[in-house]
Image (cartoon, rainbow, N blue to C red):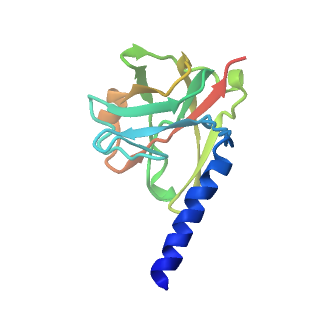
Amino acid sequence: MKKGLCIIMILLVVLASPLFADETFTTDVNMSVSGYLLHGFLDPSSDTLRDTTAVDNALGKDGVDLYYTIRTNQPAGMLVYAEITPFQRQTDEASGQVTIAIASVTVNGKEIAPTSASEIGAEGQSSVVTNGTLVTATKSVYPLIDFDSVYGTTEYTYVIHITADQQQVAEAPPGQYLSSVTMSLTYKD
């Protein structure tokens, strides 16, 4: 009985297939690729972008390198700025404030001069809480990068080199010093 049922099912499928032979099925597939813009500090050892990075021995005579990367698949004209505070000694209020100026900033070997913060609409002061004390330092704004991206996945990596004023380093009391670098992107008009 089961063999007879299977044979009847196969015959029905074979006999029914010519009925649907003239039917055509179409499917429209709409796909899109989202636009993206990623930027951050590149960790060269793992090729990953990070929101923050910490660099040791930044007061050395050779300075430090920060690898800043932009990944995008959209064409755009952009300007990249960095707000950089002088190095500040991390100490309690009783021992007094000591700062060490930024001597130079370069991007891919080209020296960049700071711009007045008011010229790009940024505040000229930066406040940091250090050991429970509010410390205010003047920051400098550096117009680091002016670029135009193209269609397709592109990646732009820049080496930002920061050097502290070595005369001030030699005269500064021992301690831990901290400088902050804040990156910002703006579209060109």
Q: How many marks can you see?
A: 0
Q: Point out residue 104 in the picture as x, y percentages from the top left corner.
A: 41, 22
Of 181 and 32, nearer the camera is 32
Query: Is 59 rendered above or below residue 90?
Result: above
The quadrant of the image that shows the C terminus is top right
Residue 68 placement, left or right of 63:
right
Query: Is 16 rendered above or below residue 151?
Result: below
Q: Point out residue 68 in the picture as x, y percentages from the top left corner.
A: 44, 32
Residue at the image position 61 percent from the left and 30 percent from the top? 185
Residue at the image position 41 percent from the left and 24 percent from the top? 103
The picture quadrant where one finds residue 64 is: top left
Query: From this viewpoint, which residue is outermost toward the bottom?
Result: 1
Query: Is 131 rendered above or below residue 176?
Result: below
Residue 38 placement, left or right of 110:
right
Residue at the image position 61 percent from the left and 42 percent from the top? 126
Query: Is 74 rendered above or below residue 129?
Result: above
Can residue 145 be seen here? The reply is: yes
Q: Point out residue 164 in the picture as x, y percentages from the top left corner.
A: 37, 30
Of 94 and 83, nearer the camera is 83
Residue 47 placement, left or right of 28:
left
Of 16 and 48, nearer the camera is 16
Residue at the image position 55 percent from the left and 70 percent from the top? 9
Can residue 141 be seen here? The reply is: no
The picture quadrant where one finds residue 29 is: top right
